[in-house]
Image (tube, rainbow, N blue to C red):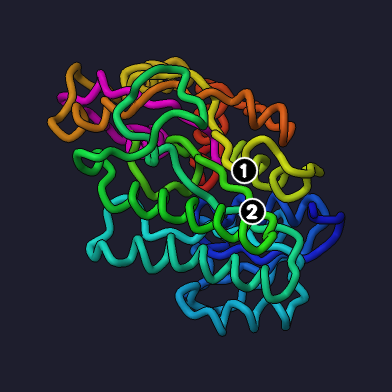
């Protein structure tokens, strides 16, 4: 049961990085959005939400509290939920991964079951894939390992458990659940590094940024704006008994960190930025899980195809970062 036009969507973590872009995308598409989370929106993310701000309402609440989540859904007439709240890839307290990612998903799905909501979209990650067996990596690629956790540790385990719980609600209770595996998300207001943010910020302020190593690190980058479109399509796509309920969201091309820096230097020839070859030990372990993701199923079922290649996505990010810093383009 897909989301009908103009209905209200509750977005957990709606004032976070990915959640803010999803909230804006849905608002601009005509939906009312409840940004459900513990903190008010930051100055940077308020800028992200601004184009759709009149249709976005912040409701303070904790996704680990099922009563608060359900009450927000009832009070605002939510017809669907996007679970975008996350503890991040390296929290100081590993239990946060499970409390927010996993139990947050359980609470969202259970609220949908009780209230008869149209759909739940879970924001997952390519971190669920274990050591790369082949590429492009499709959704049927093995996840996890019987030998030990992959380089993402608790973050990976939490995302896997989140997806499994969602699929159980789908099969046992008829909750319409879709999970999106995002890959190395970047864009204005990002909090992670990915060998992107520090370089963009340096260019925007005229500073220097040099790293001695990490240029050989590989990732399949995807613009946060494309991720927001994918979430909207996952809510509104009309399908019955889809072949999959879990979909990759990526551009589908591997790039090295040195490609990022070279692209930024091409966009800003006066930039004083550089990155040396090689990888850190942690990046070597991480790189074993990296591969280009296959987007065939997302395109066939959801109608999604990423619109921003690396150059377009970085150019867009740089324009917004310069505007935020008050620097002429």
Q: Quadrant of the C terminus?
A: top right
Q: Earlier in the sequence, mark 2 or mark 1?
A: 2
Q: Residue furthest front?
A: 172
Image quarter (top left, top right, bottom left or bottom right) of the N terminus: bottom right
Q: Is residue 101 above or below residue 34?
A: above
User: For numbered disc 1, what is the local secondary structure?
Assistant: loop
Residue extending farthest to the right is 5
* Residue 325 falls left or right of residue 278: right
Q: Please determine whether, in this image, residue 56 is positioned above or below residue 4.
A: below
In depth, the one of 154 and 242 nearer the eye is 242
Q: CA distance from mark 2 to mark 1?
A: 7 Å
Quarter of the rendering containing residue 304: top right
Magenta span contains residue 215: yes
For the record, the magenta segment spans: 195-224
Per the image, the residue denoted by label 2 is 177
- Label 2 environment density (alpha carbons within 10 Å; few <14, some 14–19, many ≥20): many
- Would you place residue 306 above or below residue 166 in this image? above
Q: Nearer the viewer, residue 70 or 19?
A: 70
Q: Residue at x 57, y 32 (%)?
A: 316
Question: Which residue is denoted by mark 1 in the rendering?
Answer: 245
Give residue 27's position: percent from left, percent from top.
75, 56
Whether the magenta-drawn stretch holds residue 23 is answered as no
Q: Residue shown at 51%/32% (left/top)? A: 139
């Amino acid at each position: 049961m897909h989301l009908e036009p103009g209905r209200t969507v509750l977005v957990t973590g709606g004032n976070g990085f990915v959640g803010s872009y999803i909230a804006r995308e849905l608002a601009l598409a005509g939906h009312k959005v409840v940004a459900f989370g513990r903190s008010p929106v930051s100055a940077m993310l308020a800028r992200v939400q601004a184009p759709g701000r009149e249709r976005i309402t912040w409701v303070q609440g904790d996704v680990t509290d099922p009563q608060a989540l359900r009450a927000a859904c009832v009070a605002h007439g939510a017809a669907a939920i996007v679970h975008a709240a996350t503890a991040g890839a390296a929290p100081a307290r590993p239990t946060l991964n499970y409390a927010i990612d996993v139990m947050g998903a359980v609470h969202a799905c259970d609220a949908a079951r009780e209230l008869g909501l149209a759909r739940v979209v879970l924001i997952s990650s390519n971190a669920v894939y274990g050591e790369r067996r082949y590429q492009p990596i499709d959704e049927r690629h093995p996840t996890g390992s019987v030998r030990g956790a992959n380089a993402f540790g608790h973050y990976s385990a939490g995302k896997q458990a989140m997806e499994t719980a969602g699929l159980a609600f789908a099969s046992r209770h008829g909750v319409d659940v879709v999970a999106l595996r995002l890959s190395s998300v970047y864009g204005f207001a990002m909090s992670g590094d990915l060998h992107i943010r520090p370089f963009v910020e340096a260019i925007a302020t005229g500073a220097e940024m040099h790293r001695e190593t990490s240029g050989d690190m590989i990732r399949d980058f995807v613009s946060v704006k494309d991720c927001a479109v994918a979430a909207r399509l996952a809510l509104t796509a009309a399908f019955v008994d889809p072949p999959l309920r879990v979909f990759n969201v990526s551009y589908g091309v591997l790039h090295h960190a040195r490609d990022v820096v070279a692209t930024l230097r091409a966009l800003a020839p006066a930039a004083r930025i550089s990155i040396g070859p090689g990888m850190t030990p942690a990046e070597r372990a991480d790189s074993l899980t990296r591969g280009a993701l296959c987007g065939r199923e997302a395109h066939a079922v959801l109608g999604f195809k990423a619109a921003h290649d690396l150059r377009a996505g970085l150019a867009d990010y740089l324009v917004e970062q310069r505007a935020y810093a008050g620097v002429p383009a």
